[in-house]
Image: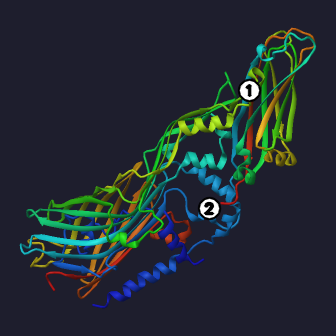
Amino acid sequence: MLKWQYIAVYLIAGVAYGQNKQLLYGVDDLPQSLLLNPGASYTYEAYFGVPVLSGISVGGGSSGVSVWDIFQEGGDINARIDTAIRDLDNKDVFTVNQQLELLSAGWLGRDEKTFYSAGIYQETDAIVYFPKDFALLAYDGNADFINSSFEFSDISFTAELISVYHFGINKKISKKLRLGARAKLYMSAANINSTNNEGFFRTRTTPEGPNFYTHEIVGANVTANTSGLTDDFKASRLVFSSNLGLGIDIGGTYDISNQLSVSASLLDVGFIAHGNDVQNYRFSGSFDLDGIELEFPALLAGQETTEYWEIFINEAETAVPFEDELEDSYVTLRPVKFNGALNYGFGTNLNGECDCTNKNGTRYTSHVGLHINAIKRPRSVLASATLYFDKSWWPFLKTKFTYTVDTFSKNNVGLLVSTKIKNFNFYLAGDNLLEYSDVSQARQLTLQAGMQVIMDSKN
Amino acid sequence: MYKSYPFIFCVISLLSIISCSSELDFDQADDIVLSPRIDADLVFFSLGTDTFIDVSIPDTTLVVRDTTRLEFLDDSFIRDNIREIEFTFQVDNSFLQSFSNRSIFLNGNGVPQYMLEFTVAPSPDGSSMRTTIVEQVNEIELEAILNSIQVANEIQLNTNGQFIDGVISLQSKALYSLEISDF
């Protein structure tokens, strides 16, 4: 298989932190930075994206295991799976995120202090936590785990396919402060999730009888919700879906000095209400089983044999029912993201003597800084810290180098290249470049690209 | 203005050149085998003196028997993937008599397919005497068990003309070893 196919496997079906766009955050001459901080600085008067191509972002990764770890040539694949299952824990995640800007445009208001931006993008987002307990139960069985609990909370995953209609305002409040907000209308084409599950299964020894063990399900409350997963799925739901949600992004930038600034944003503070094409699955209750107790009733009372099995099944189905025909509406929260950055500019002032866009501001050729990113996930917050250096080499070429550390990677080096030919801008960004030396061993890859027409005040 | 083309081209080319992949073999997915071992209770009971209604008859053989369906034995997943079964029986007996215990696996028509029989040791003095039996079934016996859907447990007591008094308690479990390779 060709190496690009491996990359595709990672990016399409794989597992990563595609939602951390450290390469695009704070890049003031790319409109995509406004999607990461509605209060970001910008250097243009207007832009419009090439439909469907203005912004493409795909990412996939795994926190604990790579494709190579399992499918390397030679050896015993079962031994490698065994090792992986034991090494992974229930905080390890497999994620995939993909965004595609369908339409995008932005323009400076007449007051020359307010910038408006709007657009539509499609997003696929999925995260699956490694269900350690039940992976062990499936792989090893319960025999080696007597008196151990298998927690249902280990089952945690979400996946959604949505489109987002958005409109943002970015306003210069003062000479030093810029604030922004973006309203979002979410349309969910498809969703499946199972989070916040409770209870456990355990096989417990019972020295006092009545049998060797008690197999117990304690306080089970396991629910899976789905919407839009019908046999006649239609892509038109991406354009209009009756499963709607609302959200908001907020952000700002504050210039501490001519060279030093801080920025922060909070994205996707919102929800989606799922009420159509909904199907829920629920398993709940508590139940103990010691085996089947024989009562020898025929001998005692001359009766027919007791239907122990039927009684057991009835009791189990009553105590821990599995309901698969529910159609209860439900609400999902969007994964909230936080960005914060400290930026230091130096070098030549690209605005020269006359700063026509950012009044009285300066725009340096080079920047260094620290960027913090965090995303709220069902069972944890995934956070990362990035050091970056970006430089405008010439008016038509800009690069940004990043070094990112997160819980699972300490050697993530990324590169953004952005070029501008007249008003036409094209950018390409990728991180974990060191992993490209052997993509099969990569645990995380993301790629972003886009093209748009950008008009700044000098044009 | 077009000076950036070579740069972009170089970046993409460099990425393409330096990126490579170790050889992977996805066909190994066919070799994946799960081997869970499921340890589960089977049947249990506790019988006292009054269970044996003919206690007044000296020197007689008393038999009590009960049957339950075990429908999971007929489950296609179990039938396709089970490789071994190990039964464990533990009987505590305070009767002065020994017992013969028979666990008989029957098909849907009640025809015996497999039988596991063992003797329960008598109590020497009325205190509880424990007998433990571990039985590993072989491949032929496994096939017979998988043809079954119910199990009958039969307890046989020979009074030997002695006074009958005590409690007999049986616990049982099975350790099922599976090999799952078809996903």
Residue farthest along the left direction in this orientation = A111
Residue A391 image-quadrant placement:
bottom left
Q: Of A191 and B38, which appears nearest the observer?
A: A191
Residue B181 image-quadrant placement:
bottom right
Query: Could you say whether the residue bearing mark 1 is in a helix, strand or loop?
Result: loop
Under mark 2, the amino acid is Ile
Q: Name the residue under label 2.
A: A70
Residue A2: where, in percent of width, then height? 57, 78
Q: Mark 1 points at which residue?
A: A303
Residue A314 image-quadrant placement:
top right
Decide if residue B17 is in sight here.
yes
Which tag is nearer the camera, tag 2 or tag 1?
Answer: 1
- Which image quarter holds the N terminus of chain A? bottom right
Residue B113: where, in percent of width, then height? 85, 43
C-alpha gap between disc 2 and disc 1: 58 Å
Query: For this view, does A395 lie left or right of residue B121?
Result: left
- Which image quarter holds the C terminus of chain A? bottom left
Mark 1 burial class by Cα count in 10 Å: few <14, some 14-19, many 20+? few
